Amino acid sequence: MGMRIGELAARAETTTRTLRYYESRGLLPARRGDNGYRTYDEGDLRLVRQIRTLQHFGFDLEETRPFVECLRAGHPAGDSCPASLAVYRRKLDELDALIGELQAVRETVAGQLVRAELARDELAAEARVPGGPEPECELGGQER
Protein backbone atom coordinates (compact mmCIF):
# COMPACT_ATOMS: atom_id res chain seq x y z
CA MET A 1 0.00 0.00 0.00
CA GLY A 2 1.29 3.45 -0.92
CA MET A 3 1.31 6.69 0.99
CA ARG A 4 -1.72 8.86 1.32
CA ILE A 5 -1.46 12.56 0.60
CA GLY A 6 -1.00 13.58 4.25
CA GLU A 7 1.94 11.24 4.72
CA LEU A 8 3.57 12.41 1.49
CA ALA A 9 3.10 16.02 2.55
CA ALA A 10 4.68 15.36 5.95
CA ARG A 11 7.63 13.44 4.51
CA ALA A 12 8.23 16.08 1.82
CA GLU A 13 7.81 18.91 4.36
CA THR A 14 5.05 20.59 2.39
CA THR A 15 1.27 20.84 2.46
CA THR A 16 -1.46 18.72 0.93
CA ARG A 17 -2.63 21.84 -0.87
CA THR A 18 0.77 22.17 -2.54
CA LEU A 19 0.68 18.52 -3.60
CA ARG A 20 -2.76 18.96 -5.12
CA TYR A 21 -1.45 22.01 -6.98
CA TYR A 22 1.50 20.00 -8.35
CA GLU A 23 -0.99 17.37 -9.42
CA SER A 24 -3.16 19.95 -11.19
CA ARG A 25 -0.07 21.18 -13.07
CA GLY A 26 0.80 17.66 -14.18
CA LEU A 27 3.98 17.43 -12.12
CA LEU A 28 2.70 14.81 -9.71
CA PRO A 29 0.75 11.76 -10.87
CA ALA A 30 -2.90 11.53 -9.87
CA ARG A 31 -3.24 7.88 -8.90
CA ARG A 32 -6.15 6.69 -6.81
CA GLY A 33 -6.44 3.56 -4.71
CA ASP A 34 -9.47 1.25 -4.64
CA ASN A 35 -10.85 3.38 -1.82
CA GLY A 36 -10.72 6.51 -4.00
CA TYR A 37 -7.92 8.17 -2.02
CA ARG A 38 -4.84 9.54 -3.71
CA THR A 39 -1.92 7.16 -3.37
CA TYR A 40 1.79 7.89 -3.75
CA ASP A 41 5.05 5.98 -3.62
CA GLU A 42 8.73 6.68 -2.89
CA GLY A 43 9.23 7.85 -6.49
CA ASP A 44 6.60 10.53 -5.95
CA LEU A 45 8.42 11.62 -2.81
CA ARG A 46 11.61 12.00 -4.90
CA LEU A 47 9.66 14.11 -7.44
CA VAL A 48 8.29 16.42 -4.77
CA ARG A 49 11.67 16.79 -3.08
CA GLN A 50 13.25 17.62 -6.45
CA ILE A 51 10.60 20.27 -7.14
CA ARG A 52 10.94 21.80 -3.67
CA THR A 53 14.74 21.89 -3.86
CA LEU A 54 14.69 23.61 -7.24
CA GLN A 55 12.09 26.12 -6.07
CA HIS A 56 14.26 26.85 -3.02
CA PHE A 57 17.08 27.65 -5.47
CA GLY A 58 14.82 30.15 -7.27
CA PHE A 59 13.45 28.04 -10.11
CA ASP A 60 9.82 28.68 -10.95
CA LEU A 61 7.46 25.74 -11.00
CA GLU A 62 7.47 25.34 -14.79
CA GLU A 63 11.28 25.27 -14.81
CA THR A 64 11.12 22.14 -12.64
CA ARG A 65 9.20 20.17 -15.27
CA PRO A 66 12.27 18.81 -17.20
CA PHE A 67 13.75 17.55 -13.92
CA VAL A 68 10.48 15.80 -13.00
CA GLU A 69 10.24 14.27 -16.48
CA CYS A 70 13.84 13.07 -16.21
CA LEU A 71 13.08 11.30 -12.93
CA ARG A 72 9.90 9.82 -14.38
CA ALA A 73 11.92 8.47 -17.32
CA GLY A 74 13.86 6.37 -14.82
CA HIS A 75 17.03 8.42 -14.43
CA PRO A 76 18.51 8.28 -10.92
CA ALA A 77 18.83 12.07 -10.82
CA GLY A 78 16.47 14.64 -12.26
CA ASP A 79 19.27 16.77 -13.62
CA SER A 80 20.99 14.21 -15.84
CA CYS A 81 18.83 14.77 -18.95
CA PRO A 82 19.58 17.29 -21.71
CA ALA A 83 16.45 19.37 -21.00
CA SER A 84 17.41 19.67 -17.33
CA LEU A 85 20.93 20.74 -18.26
CA ALA A 86 19.47 23.41 -20.56
CA VAL A 87 17.38 24.77 -17.68
CA TYR A 88 20.49 24.92 -15.48
CA ARG A 89 22.32 26.86 -18.21
CA ARG A 90 19.44 29.34 -18.61
CA LYS A 91 19.24 29.82 -14.84
CA LEU A 92 22.97 30.48 -14.63
CA ASP A 93 22.70 33.08 -17.40
CA GLU A 94 19.81 34.70 -15.52
CA LEU A 95 21.79 34.70 -12.26
CA ASP A 96 24.86 36.16 -13.97
CA ALA A 97 22.73 39.00 -15.34
CA LEU A 98 21.25 39.67 -11.89
CA ILE A 99 24.69 39.62 -10.30
CA GLY A 100 25.84 42.19 -12.88
CA GLU A 101 22.88 44.42 -12.07
CA LEU A 102 23.52 44.12 -8.34
CA GLN A 103 27.21 44.93 -8.81
CA ALA A 104 26.24 48.10 -10.71
CA VAL A 105 23.83 49.11 -7.94
CA ARG A 106 26.50 48.39 -5.33
CA GLU A 107 28.99 50.62 -7.16
CA THR A 108 26.40 53.41 -7.29
CA VAL A 109 25.64 53.11 -3.58
CA ALA A 110 29.37 53.00 -2.73
CA GLY A 111 29.88 56.18 -4.76
CA GLN A 112 26.99 57.87 -2.97
CA LEU A 113 28.50 56.87 0.38
CA VAL A 114 31.88 58.38 -0.55
CA ARG A 115 30.15 61.59 -1.70
CA ALA A 116 28.08 61.78 1.47
CA GLU A 117 31.06 61.21 3.74
CA LEU A 118 33.04 63.94 1.95
CA ALA A 119 30.12 66.36 2.29
CA ARG A 120 29.80 65.50 5.98
CA ASP A 121 33.53 66.04 6.54
CA GLU A 122 33.40 69.42 4.75
CA LEU A 123 30.48 70.53 6.92
CA ALA A 124 32.26 69.39 10.05
CA ALA A 125 35.39 71.32 9.02
CA GLU A 126 33.34 74.47 8.36
CA ALA A 127 31.60 74.11 11.72
CA ARG A 128 34.95 74.22 13.51
CA VAL A 129 35.68 77.62 11.92
CA PRO A 130 34.31 80.43 14.08
CA GLY A 131 31.04 81.60 12.53
CA GLY A 132 30.78 78.44 10.40
CA PRO A 133 27.47 76.68 9.91
CA GLU A 134 26.13 74.22 12.46
CA PRO A 135 25.82 70.76 10.90
CA GLU A 136 22.23 69.56 10.77
CA CYS A 137 21.13 66.01 11.10
CA GLU A 138 19.22 64.75 8.07
CA LEU A 139 16.31 64.05 10.40
CA GLY A 140 16.02 67.76 11.00
CA GLY A 141 17.71 68.12 14.38
CA GLN A 142 21.04 69.68 15.28
CA GLU A 143 24.06 67.42 15.76
CA ARG A 144 25.30 67.45 19.32
Image (cartoon, helix red, strand yellow):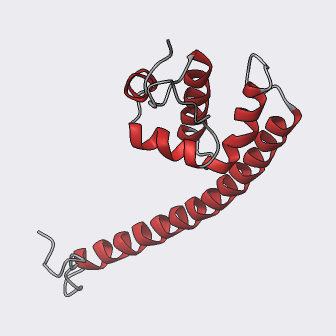
Q: Residue at x 56, y 48 (%)?
A: 24
Tell me: residue 112, above or below residue 92. Answer: below
Depth check, front residue: 86 or 98: 86
Q: Residue at x 15, y 72 (%)?
A: 143
Q: Residue at x 62, y 19 (%)?
A: 43
Tell me: residue 39, above or below residue 84. Answer: above
Residue 24 is left or right of residue 138, and the answer is right
- Number of numbered labels in the structure image: 0
Q: Position of residue 64 (x, y in %)?
A: 67, 41
Q: Position of residue 8 (x, y in %)?
A: 45, 24
Q: Residue at x 40, y 66 (%)?
A: 117
Residue 58 is left or right of residue 15, and the answer is right
Residue projecting furthest to the right: 82
Q: Determine which quarter of the picture holds residue 16.
A: top left
Q: Position of residue 57 (x, y in %)?
A: 58, 39
Q: Position of residue 125 (x, y in %)?
A: 31, 73
